[in-house]
Amino acid sequence: MGNDCIFCKIVEGVIPSFKIYEDENTLAFMDINPVNPGHCLVVPKNHAPNLFESEPEDLANTMATVRKVARAVQQVAKPYGLNLLQANGAGAAQSVFHLHFHIIPRGRDDDLRMNWGLKSGNKDEIAALAAKIKAAVED
């Protein structure tokens, strides 16, 4: 664990999250600053600051979870499209230095740019959507 890593603290349960999927190697949870409804994150439980420092097995496990959760988001949110975003380093706008993948549902003409500003989401709406996606992941 990175001592100050917010995602490690989420994995450990020190910081609460809207979990939608968890197995022995990975965790998926809702982004609390969503760019669109259904925006969520998938992280490996083992800390690695980026793709380049990640263990191949951790990356393989994480990508399997990304696929599983993306399918659930597609089923529940029914977006116009879906982006996967993974950034490495400050120059790529990586803000949390723990390997992670964003699953981003897209709306028609949502004008989303890949380096978006943060705006707080409605926690009740996030929780409700998290429950639906979690149920879809477990199917």
Image (cartoon, rainbow, N blue to C red):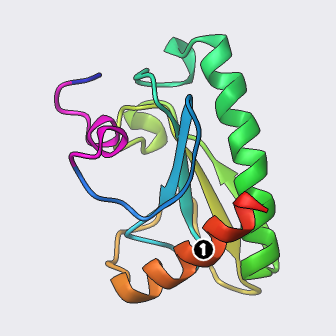
Residue at left 56%, top 80%?
Answer: 129
Horizontal side, residue 89 vs residue 2: left or right: right
Q: Which residue matches tag 1? A: 38
Please name whichever residue, 24 or 34, is drawn nearer the observer in this view of the structure: 24
Image vertical order of residue 115 relative to residue 98, above or below: below
Name the quarter where the C terminus is drawn: bottom right
Q: Quadrant of residue 138?
A: bottom right
Q: Quadrant of residue 111?
A: bottom right
**Which quadrant holds residue 3?**
top left
Can residue 96 be seen at all in this image of the molecule?
A: yes
Q: How far across and how far down the image is residue 34, in percent?
A: 47, 72
* In the displayed structure image, the side of residue 138 where residue 35 appears, left or right: left
Residue at left 70%, top 55%?
A: 69
Q: Is residue 27 above or below residue 19?
A: above
Give the residue type that dot 1 points to.
Answer: Gly
10 falls in the magenta region? yes
Assess whether residue 104 is covered by the magenta stretch. no
In this rendered view, identify the residue nearer to me: 110 or 135: 135
In the rendered view, tell whether residue 25 sits above or below residue 17: above
Quarter of the image that includes the N terminus = top left
Q: Is residue 100 left or right of residue 104?
A: left
Magenta region: which residues?
3-14
Residue 122 showing in the rendered view = no
